[in-house]
Amino acid sequence: MKHSFLTLVAILAFVACSSTPTKVDTGPIKARTFAFVDRGPTAAPAYADQNPQIHAAIQYAIARNLAGRGLAKVNTGGDVTVGYLLIIGNNATTTSMDEYFGYSSDAHALVDKVHSYQTEKNNNPNFFEAGTIVIDLVDSRSHALLRRNYAMRPILRDPSADVRSARLQEAVDAALKDLRIAN
């Protein structure tokens, strides 16, 4: 546990030095509703993740956290737009699921930072697999990034559905732990 905490602190320090914001906090966010990034009317491309259950689970965990803060989920046109990026890596490769992150170069830059940290800065000679979730809250009118934070966790092999759901909720809660909503 101590090693995981130190690793997370090192990641925070590493990514905080770059031009792609990894944590944006302008104080309490004034909002009552939220919607997830709209992917548009077309289906995901063939190379995109074909497991909609993963996105449903992530969106459920985020919606649950935000509902606990008084934000209501709407299909479109929320006060804030929620985007998320899932980055999965090991000693050799890093991939991402960015279908609900939005259309910006930030996704590629964030994936590169995580990969660089995991493969170059970590100095861990042992095999590892880690998942990182990045969550953005964007003002739906001005498109200003109001909040960005992330959580990284080791990936478990074949966990039960209950364990997977609990770990996902814990990671989402960690990424949104300092979020303040103004009434």
Image: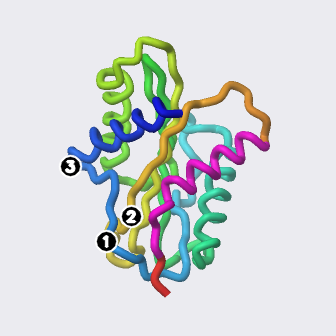
* Front position in the image: 57 or 117: 117
- Judging by the rendered image, the residue that carries numbered circle 3 is 19
Whether 51 is drawn above or below 106: the answer is above
From the viewer's perspective, is 31 left or right of 12?
right
From the viewer's perspective, is 178 left or right of 123?
right
In the rendered image, residue 164 lying in the magenta stretch gets the answer yes
Secondary structure under tag 2 reads strand
Dot label at residue 39: none
Q: Residue furthest front?
A: 2
Dot label at residue 26: 1
In the rendered image, residue 136 lying in the magenta stretch gets the answer no
Whether 25 is drawn above or below 52: the answer is below
Secondary structure under tag 1 reads loop
Amino acid on which the number 2 mark rests in the picture: Arg
Query: Going 64% across and 38% down the picture, which residue do you hit?
Result: 50
Q: Are marks 2 and 3 in contact (CB under 8 Å)?
A: no
